[in-house]
Image (cartoon, rainbow, N blue to C red):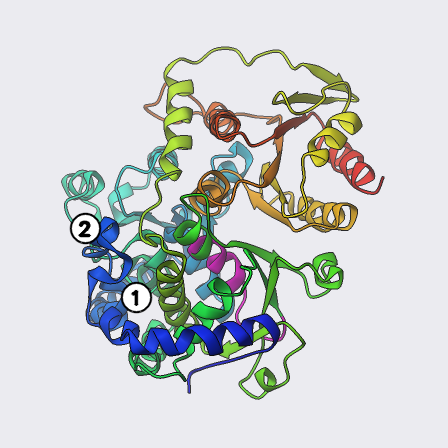
């Protein structure tokens, strides 16, 4: 077995109750054979062009030689640093793969000026850029590409020798890149972005960075028979039932890295689960938790804990009410994709669309089309500007946080969204744990704007019981976007404001804090969490 799963408590009961029916319905065999009717008539059109991920690993084998040849060519030119411009599925899987294999990859999945500037500054003369966008029109990725093109030209480097594009055939980026003379790898258009780990979107940047992608592909191919069989031992069916069929539904899944060699799998699974299931007012909210997270000691009735452990042997001793899984990296990627697709059937939703992701993008574009000076803050408290919805008091930082948390019901959660440089300020992730300890409720943390392509779908389309804390900074130095009438600083501000407006339209309480000094602001927030 390349993947092992064991469960106890409510998850084990769900497996015993639901998996036999999935087997009787022939779900596994129908899924791997491309049956688009599994998710109902309303989802059939979308599903019919979104099941290529099942055989993606075998199909991707054909580009490995080209990727390895290009890597060798780049190395011969002294190019040994690979940067990746991409969002969501285009960046999360490559980050997991390279971190797990101990290979350096600079992931640029932000519009924060400092983070973009660092990616441009560090070793540009020996850097090649992979530009990944399924649609070919992702605003963040287009902006990042423009910045690199200008930097290359300023340094006397021909961008066509350094930029590699991964996109769907026929996308706007596909045509533009070929006309510009860039090297282009086309991905399978029948695979959605969050299911694209084993397509060109995962293989090209990782292979260029130095990962043995053949081994990864072989691991996934080896796992395919395990999820193809309509059997009660099918680990993909079991995982689907464990996360989507508990009774009553534990609609929050805490993902805990607990011995696995795979680095960052929880962050990748977070996008896969949230975007696939969080819609139509239902879904499963994934939360990446530390091994000693406060939520684990609280015994929360709506939290299903899934531990990522090191070996199949470890999964045989499962704590009460928890799930433990183990497997190779390639197997984990494929089995989780399969399980989440089946979870969509269990929940009665289409796991392949993301109807609420576009709303925040539209709101941000509207703000950029009509740039105005930012509205005056309703309150200023010790260098922190405070804004909020009608449900949030605005007298001070502490009072506003108290008012926000007062909206947190027994089944709710807090989402903290930091529109900051995630490379330069990782300490802000401490806030997740601090607020979980204060509230006794699940807390999810996301870096903006990358979470907009991940949990952003769930926050607007999933179970409507979240409250939201936005954290913004004041860039010390902004950065122009070549050919655009707005800067990176204006872009990230518009993305935050656009998302806040959409959340407010959906009736979600939102508190926005702009920190003049990040160190002081962090300490103030940690103190507020400890009250």
SS category of the residue bearing label 1? helix
- Up/down of 252 relative to 16, above or below: above
- Say left or right for 281 vs 34: right
Q: In this view, does 352 lie above or below 140?
A: below
Percent position of residue 31, x then y: 26, 69
Residue 511 spot, x, y in % from top left = 64, 28
Say the numbered circle drawn on residue 72: 1
Q: Where the C terminus falls, by quadrant?
A: top right
> Toward which corner of the image does residue 382 lie, by quadrant?
top right
Characterize the local packing of mark 1: few (<14), some (14-19) or many (20 or more) Cα atoms within 10 angstroms: some
For label 2, the residue is 45
Q: Which residue is drawn at 36% across and 79% down?
A: 219
Q: Nearer the viewer, mark 1 or mark 2?
A: 2
Q: How crowded is mark 2: few (under 14 residues within 10 Å), some or many (20 or more)?
A: few
- In screen coordinates, is 142 left or right of 18? left
* Marks 1 and 2, the one that precedes in the sequence: 2
Q: Could you tell me if residue 216 is visible in this image?
A: no
Residue range (magenta): 258-272
Residue occupying the point 72% across, 49% down: 436
Q: Percent from the top left, x then y, of residue 386? A: 68, 22
Residue 144 % position (x, y): 39, 37
């Amino acid at each position: 077995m390349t993947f092992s799963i064991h469960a106890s408590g409510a998850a084990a009961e769900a497996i015993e109750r639901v998996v036999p029916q999935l087997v009787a319905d022939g779900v596994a065999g129908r899924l791997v054979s491309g049956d688009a009717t599994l998710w109902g008539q309303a989802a059939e059109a979308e599903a019919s062009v979104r099941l290529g991920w099942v055989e993606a690993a075998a199909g991707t084998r054909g580009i490995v030689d080209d990727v390895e040849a290009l890597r060798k060519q780049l190395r011969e030119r002294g190019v040994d640093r690979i940067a990746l411009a991409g969002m969501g599925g285009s960046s999360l899987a490559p980050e997991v793969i390279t971190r797990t294999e101990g290979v350096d990859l600079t992931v640029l999945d932000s519009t924060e000026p400092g983070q973009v500037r660092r990616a441009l500054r560090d070793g540009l003369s020996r850097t090649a850029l992979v530009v990944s966008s399924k649609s070919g029109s992702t605003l963040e990725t287009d902006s990042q590409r423009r910045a690199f093109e200008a930097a290359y030209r300023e340094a006397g480097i021909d961008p066509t020798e350094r930029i590699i594009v991964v996109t769907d055939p026929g996308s706007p980026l596909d045509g533009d890149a070929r006309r510009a003379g860039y090297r282009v790898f086309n991905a399978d258009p029948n695979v959605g972005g969050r299911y694209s780990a084993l397509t060109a979107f995962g293989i090209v940047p990782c292979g260029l960075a130095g990962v043995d992608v053949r081994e990864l592909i072989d691991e996934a191919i080896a796992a395919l028979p395990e999820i193809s069989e309509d059997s009660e031992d099918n680990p993909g069916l079991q995982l689907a039932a464990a996360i989507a069929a508990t009774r009553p539904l534990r609609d929050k899944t805490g993902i805990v890295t607990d011995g696995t060699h795979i680095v960052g799998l929880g962050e990748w699974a977070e996008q896969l689960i949230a975007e696939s299931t969080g819609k139509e007012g239902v879904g499963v909210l994934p939360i990446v938790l530390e091994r000693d997270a406060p939520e684990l000691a609280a015994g929360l009735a709506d939290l299903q804990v899934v531990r990522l452990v090191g070996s199949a042997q470890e999964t045989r001793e499962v704590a009460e009410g928890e799930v433990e899984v183990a497997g190779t990296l390639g197997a984990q990627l494929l089995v989780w994709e399969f399980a989440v697709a089946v979870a969509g059937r269990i929940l009665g939703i289409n796991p392949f669309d993301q109807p609420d992701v576009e709303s925040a993008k539209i709101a941000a574009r509207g703000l950029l089309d009509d740039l105005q000076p930012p509205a005056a803050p309703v309150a200023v408290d010790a260098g922190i500007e405070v804004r909020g919805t009608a449900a949030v008091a605005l007298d001070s930082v502490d009072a506003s946080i108290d008012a926000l948390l007062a909206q947190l019901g027994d089944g709710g959660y807090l989402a903290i969204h930091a529109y900051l440089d995630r490379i330069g300020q990782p300490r802000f992730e401490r806030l997740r744990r601090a607020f979980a300890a204060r509230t006794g409720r699940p807390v999810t943390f996301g870096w903006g704007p990358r979470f907009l392509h991940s949990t952003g779908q769930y926050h607007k389309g999933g179970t409507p019981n979240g409250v939201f804390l936005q954290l913004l900074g004041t860039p010390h130095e902004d950065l122009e976007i070549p050919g655009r009438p707005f800067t990176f600083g204006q872009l990230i501000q518009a993305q935050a404001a656009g998302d806040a407006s959409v959340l407010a339209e959906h009736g979600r309480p939102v508190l926005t804090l702009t920190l003049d000094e990040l160190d002081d602001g962090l300490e103030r927030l940690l103190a507020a969490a400890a009250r």
